[in-house]
Image: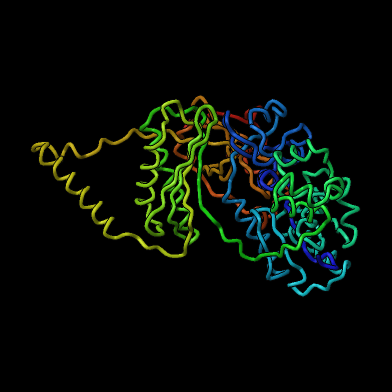
Amino acid sequence: MRRAPTILHLDMDAFYAAAEQAAKPSLRGKPVVVGGIGPRGVVATASYEARVFGVRSAMPTAQARRLCPNAAYLNPRFTLYRQVSESVMELLRALSPLVEPLSLDEAFVDLEAGGVPAETAAVRAVGERLRRDILEVTGLTGSVGLAGAKMLAKIASEAAKPDGLVVIEPGTERELLGPMPVRTLPGVGPATAETLRRAGIHTVAETAEAGEAELVRLLGKAHGSGLYAMALGRDDRPVVAERDAKSVSVEDTFEVDLTDRTRVRTEVLRLADRCVARLRAAGRSGRTVVIKVRNYDFSTLTRSETLRGPTDDPAVVREAAVRLLETVDTTGGVRLLGVGVSGLADFTQEDLFAQIATEREAEEQAAVAVAGAGPDAEAAREPEPEPEQPRRWHPGLDVVHEEFGAGWVQGSGVGRVTVRFETPWSAPGRVRTFVVDDPALRPGEPLPLRGGPDQSSAPAIRPKSVSGADGAGSASGEEISRR
């Protein structure tokens, strides 16, 4: 434990939702919910305007819609969030070489390692300056907690929300923690809290009073001893600059249970490719392939296969994932599928002989099939072109129209897509509706939240057809494009 509050914890306020509000002027000050928008979706982040209605992270989107039906429900745009996160992390790295990111919107910083004097006034000044810099660079707000330990700094940032700063002076930890519910402590989830509740332990003070021996008896040696130390305000975990990932994985939840075995296999192959793309982007390889299958009745199965060496070959991961899938009964319906790679390494060590054998076997099978098919075999091998699938316009998606410029999708259905044309630096924009296959409309890239032209007092991008002096146009701001 430190004698000065030199550990800083930053937590951006309602990060995904706040970024969407900053990017979409028409949503500022209004309830916004970001997450899966389908009937089986889950809320990732809710703006503070939506939280007033009881909407919370990890809540089923269907429940959120019942609580706050007038909110804007948007798909996440991780490209934008990563860009903003990198700007924030650069500000943190300017404070200290020891920055421990926990997620895109949360990190610990060791100010002492950055040369900040171990004085409350000095660290408070750094925290206030950081909040100002984040607002200037990103247009978003963050809450800062300062304490002598990581656990306490995180508790302080939670108490500071939204857009505040709280300092916990060393020596005041037990007085502060005592009345808090036991769930406040790291590592206390629903199961641990229920075990403690049955023993008559509800607050942090009661946890400390129970004593280490009683907590060990209830929870086991490691968990009980760790929890007792934290209840006393003791946390000597250092800020670690590099947190090594243990695995890379992707998963999808489907709006309708998958019962067709071929479709399930296709989805697993697609997920395997996405997983390898993430693996390669991180410059890593892995030797254990894992699949996750959640059935219609919410039962979840995992299967894994350890390869001879680390790989980042998509063909190898696909083959392993399909082999694992063959061991799972999916006839009742599949709600969720996932593919992951663990046992990560910074190198690959493929079994070249096995790959060559696999390729040779595939070539031989193809040759036999062609020989037995007759003179029309070559023609038969040509796959029939698949019919072009209609584009899907998800709410929140960035789009660009040849005539009206940049905008975002408000919604789509019955062959139409509604777009609001505005930018982060414009006034709330006009709405227009197009047919879903309008050739002038295409997906776009997220615009930066700051640094655009100063158009705060000018109207948003207007359709050319209503830019005349009389401003005549559709009363509702919507019309069907005749392109």
Q: How many marks?
A: 0
- Please say whether residue 152 is visible from this viewpoint: yes
- Locate residue 301, reporting x and y percent: 49, 37
Above or below 476: residue 234: below
Q: Residue at 63% across / 59% down in the picture?
A: 86
Q: Residue at 34% across / 50% down in the picture?
A: 315
- Locate residue 198, reporting x and y percent: 78, 35
- Locate residue 270, reporting x and y percent: 41, 43
Above or below 271: residue 124: below
- Please say whether residue 27 is visible from this viewpoint: no
Residue 474, image quadrant: top right
Compare residues 122 and 480 and report the one nearer the observer: 122
- Picture colour scheme: rainbow
- Quarter of the picture containing the N terminus is bottom right
- Locate residue 72, reporting x and y percent: 66, 34
Compare residues 55 and 408 and report the one nearer the observer: 55
Q: Residue at 85% across / 64% down in the picture?
A: 124
